[in-house]
Amino acid sequence: MEKQQLEELLKDMSLQEKVDQMLQITGRFYQMDINSVLTGPALQMGLIESDINMAGSILGTYGAKELKQIQKTYMEQHPHHIPMLFMMDIIHGMKTIFPMPLAMGASFEPELVRRCAQASAKEAAYSGLHVTFSPMVDLVRDARWGRVMESTGEDPYLNSRMAEAQVRGFQGESMSEEGRVCACVKHFAGYGAAVAGREYSAAELSERTLRQYYFPAYKAGIDAGAGMVMTAFNTIDNIPATANRWLMRDILRGEMGFGGVLISDFSAILETVVHGYAEDKKDAAKKAVEAGVDIDMMTGCYSENLAELVEQGIVPESLVDECVWRILDLKNKLGLFDNPYKDADEAKAEEVILCREHRALAREAAGKSCVLLKNENILPLNKEKKIAFIGPYTYCKKIISNWSVAGESKDCVSVKEAADEIFDSIHTSYHAGSQMTGRKVRFEGFSAFGKAAEPDDEEWGEEKERKELEEAVRAAKEAEIVVLSVGESYLHSGEACSRAFLDIPEVQMNLFRRIAEVNPNIVVVLFNGRPLDIREISAKSKALLVAWMPGTEGGHGIVDVLTGKVNPSGKLPMSFPYCVGQCPVFYNELSTGRPYREGDTNRYFSKYLDIPNKPLYPFGYGLSYSEFEISPVKLNKNSFCEGDVITASVTVKNTGEFPGTEVIQLYVQDVAASVARPVKELKGFEKVTLRESEEAVVSFRIDETMLSFIRADGTVGCEPGLFRIWVGNSSETSNMAEFWLTK
Ligand code: NOJ
């Protein structure tokens, strides 16, 4: 539709019609009997039948046939026949589930991330969807927070590259293209900084910290063209983000130039009342619309109050028009005025969902996101050896995380299934050995899929528990190598899954300890939605492979790595703390005035009495089956002036026995500036693949934008002086060189 036609349409709409466009309800309202909706959830939300019939968008329902039907009925009864928008959380895959986003961060491969988003978009678009609530680009530092699984980690640079890759994958050149959906960058802003890692708590961030660490990834997603942004649940500077005018008007719209649709998170407008920022629903609606929130997700705040607020002259109608214009514009960009069904097509959906190509991609991604933290000459596995595969994750197919709305564990490949394809049954044995969380453990509030959905659905009695454990220990004794697949339950991470202890369930640790008593050759495969406290398993195992929640093809991806078909190349996108008391721990911190150096015995340094300062495994760390020699950093000059560039290069040589891939990382430090700068900041990375004995030069161009920051006076730019750069294969690299930036 031409812009002018769209403008005319907006002019012709009644105030109520406009307000209806700003309401989003769940698709379940269309699946339930309308009377039970009206006397139940709708009544609680303050919605009447016409609100439900006229809502501009729905969330959480998919399926080409069903959505086409909803669209048809909706448009027929809509006075202007405006099409409806269908949205859903396609976080790391629609039906083909890719590794969880934190795992994808570990791949350090934006192009892989783009391809996975593209495949997800295809499955979603043919299933009738128009918008995905993804990517989640919140920077995360505290492993206690359950949603770290949904982010790509602790680094603004890595997060930014991953944010733009996902947006491009979802939207392509234009979201109206076949097989594309609109991306939604979330949660604006600072949601990942929940105090103490407790879900929904406030984010206490200085404006400098917000700008320096948290904003860049949102900005990158917006610059890549994301059509939508979602507000965050938390407060920023004591004002709920959802109604924060400074954040939404000055920063998002003004500074970041975002012109797309701003949607609230689920019930977040109403929650501004609970925060103590709005007096009631009417005040909440006023404050949210003043902040420029276009769509109210699942509350009646707008529907009940906006028209009245306008009629009473409290809210100018132009504010409503502004929001509705952006919603209509998005519908138009998706091509819905020309074809309201867009790509919804049952046959095409069936063809593409879980197709061979998508499964192959999921397998590739699972392999590339595994991070090898330890290997004492035991991996890759020697298939001639007697191997016992033990642990609840040997069989468990619930490896797609709890953020897979449409994904099903029945479609997943377990470790056992994948190993069966490769290993000779004479040399292998398989035992769960323990349950996932153990008897009597209950997750509260997961009703529909809580305990009943646990991997060990069937409740083991005491006798079975003892028998399974003894059998696993016997198998471990008889084996030369034990591959122990253990970790968190998939229910341990995700929204509202904060944890105060970052441990592996006791019942599995008991299994681990019993195995370790009889066989020292343990390869641990860790399934996890977050960094865990892995001191004990790290100390007592010969190899440790972090597999995360690896998705539909998880078993294949893991076995590919265990057997050496894939040489691991993943790097940690988030530090693994020494223990929970160290959280939040991250590499790009500021120096204290009394930094502790290994071996210092003076008490008055910045350190703990009882644990080290350093995480157990740092950001950027991960091993390969190959060894890589990285030469000292070479600079093409020792000083340069603004407007110029300097080149830093290293020669990387594969000195190992296998072809392999290394992620070469560039870090920068501004040694003295008008404000203190982080001890190190990632500014570039490159994946280099080398055959045995092969070498290659990896170069990074450093220009002044890489050295820029928010100066003491609030302006952005760099300052002359001494800089350090490091080029290596983890954030703890000491391969450093120095140069001067001159005026
Ligand atoms: C709440 C979550 O915070 C958000 O990420 C998600 O997109 C919405 N629910 C919709 O499901």
Image (tube, helix red, strand yellow):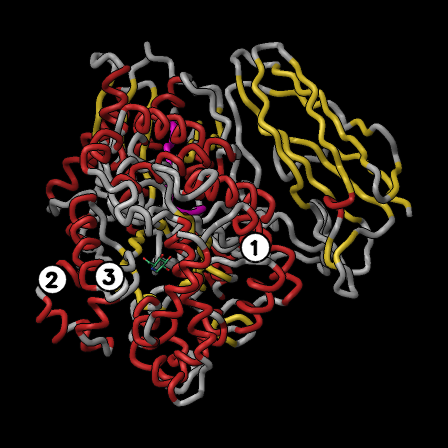
Q: Measured along the vertical axis of the image, is residue 734 above or below residue 88?
A: above
Residue drawn at x 66%, y 63% is 208
Residue drawn at x 42%, y 83% is 278
For disc 1, the marked residue is 610
Quick check: which quadrant has ligand 1?
bottom left
- Image quarter of residue 566: top left
Q: Residue 129 location in percent, x, y?
A: 29, 47
Q: Nearer the viewer, residue 257 or 100?
A: 257
Q: Measured along the vertical axis of the image, is residue 573 above or below residue 29?
A: above
Q: Residue 102 location in percent, x, y?
A: 44, 43
Residue drawn at x 44%, y 51% is 136
Q: Which of 382 and 218 is in front in this view?
A: 218
Residue drawn at x 25%, y 45% is 128
Q: Which amino acid does label 3 sit on?
A: Thr
- Circle 3 — which element? strand
- Circle 1 — which element? loop
Q: Is residue 627 visible?
A: yes
For disc 2, the marked residue is 32
> Within 10 angstroms of label 2, few (less than 14), some, or many (20 or more) residues?
few
Mark earlier in primary sequence (3, 2): 3
Q: Measured along the vertical axis of the image, is residue 13 above or below residue 524?
A: below
Q: Please state the extent of the stretch shown in magenta in the rendering.
A: 522-531
